[in-house]
Amino acid sequence: MAQLIDGKKISAEIKDELKKQVSELKADGKEITLAVIQVGNDPASSVYVGNKKKACEYIGIKSLAYELPEETTEEKLLSIIEELNNRDDVNGILVQLPLPSHINEDKVIETIDSKKDVDGFNPMSVGALSIGKKGFVSCTPAGIIQLLKRSNIEIEGKECVVVGRSNIVGKPMAMLLLRENGTVTVAHSRTKNLKEVTKRADILVAAVGKPKFITADYVKEGAVVIDVGIHRNENNKLCGDVDFESVEPKASAITPVPGGVGPMTIAMLMYNCVNGCQGE
Ligand code: GUN
């Protein structure tokens, strides 16, 4: 039976470590503040934003909530970001995505000061990661590295295959695995003979975006399988990109959905807020 990588437990450990760190900072008179901006009231975004605020409260981070109406102009949003960039008491700025279609997301992300870009989405942050310099790292892939390290799974020298090449998960995941001295392949929807590629993996990260896409025949015996997906199946139950039932018996370790990668994203967002830019 595979080792179950418990993201709920590991994220709780990280949050408790941060809580202690924040209380020590407070004793020195230092407060951490995160500005969270939501435009419109997309229900999924409201849930995510609510969870981020709750995590801040638990850890002792002050959160400044900006709940802006759907019709907010791009100009107005950019001016709020500029104002937050210039405020010494604000450590992190997070603009919840997606934004309404009349606002250019790239422009918004580029406007956030890279020293406050706790999501790690700014091109400066992405560039810094790819050349091994100090910068914020995208939270989900950073959380996956923590899951592996805290489960004593070695990355160095391992064949790592990432399926998916998004800017938020696939690409930064590949960079982080490379930084940990893994041998990294990025596969995607146009990859030929995908099964042959994924079957080489000692560590397989599935960020495909399709429910139960990775079945046992994509996985090498004894592989570590990390599932980034989250979907609702036909019975309204949560499932991932990995067909857990068929893959689990073959894997040496696997993340469940829910309770695997999911809880790590917010924990790493909190980590970014408290610790600032990380790297060399
Ligand atoms: N929308 C979905 N996930 C995220 C995230 O991690 N950060 C932001 N800003 N928006 C999101």
Image: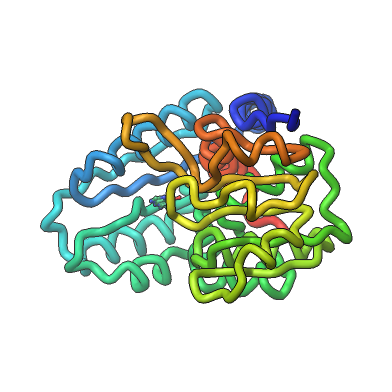
> Where residue 273 sits in the image (x, y, percent)?
56, 45
What residue is rendered at 67% in x and 45% in y? 225
From the viewer's perspective, is residue 273 above or below residue 279? above
Left or right, 234 with respect to 214, comes to left
From the viewer's perspective, is residue 139 above or below residue 77? above
Query: Is 217 or 68 nearer to us in this picture?
Result: 217
What residue is rendered at 39% in x and 55% in y? 84
> Where residue 163 sits in the image (x, y, percent)?
58, 61
Query: Is 226 or 124 nearer to us in this picture?
Result: 226
Farthest residue in the left direction?
Answer: 71
> Where residue 177 sits in the image (x, y, percent)?
74, 60
What residue is rendered at 57% in x and 48% in y? 215
Q: Is residue 194 visible?
A: yes
What residue is rendered at 29% in x and 66% in y? 78
The C terminus, quarter of image:
bottom right
Colouring convention used in this rendered image of the protein? rainbow
Left or right, 59 with respect to 202, comes to left
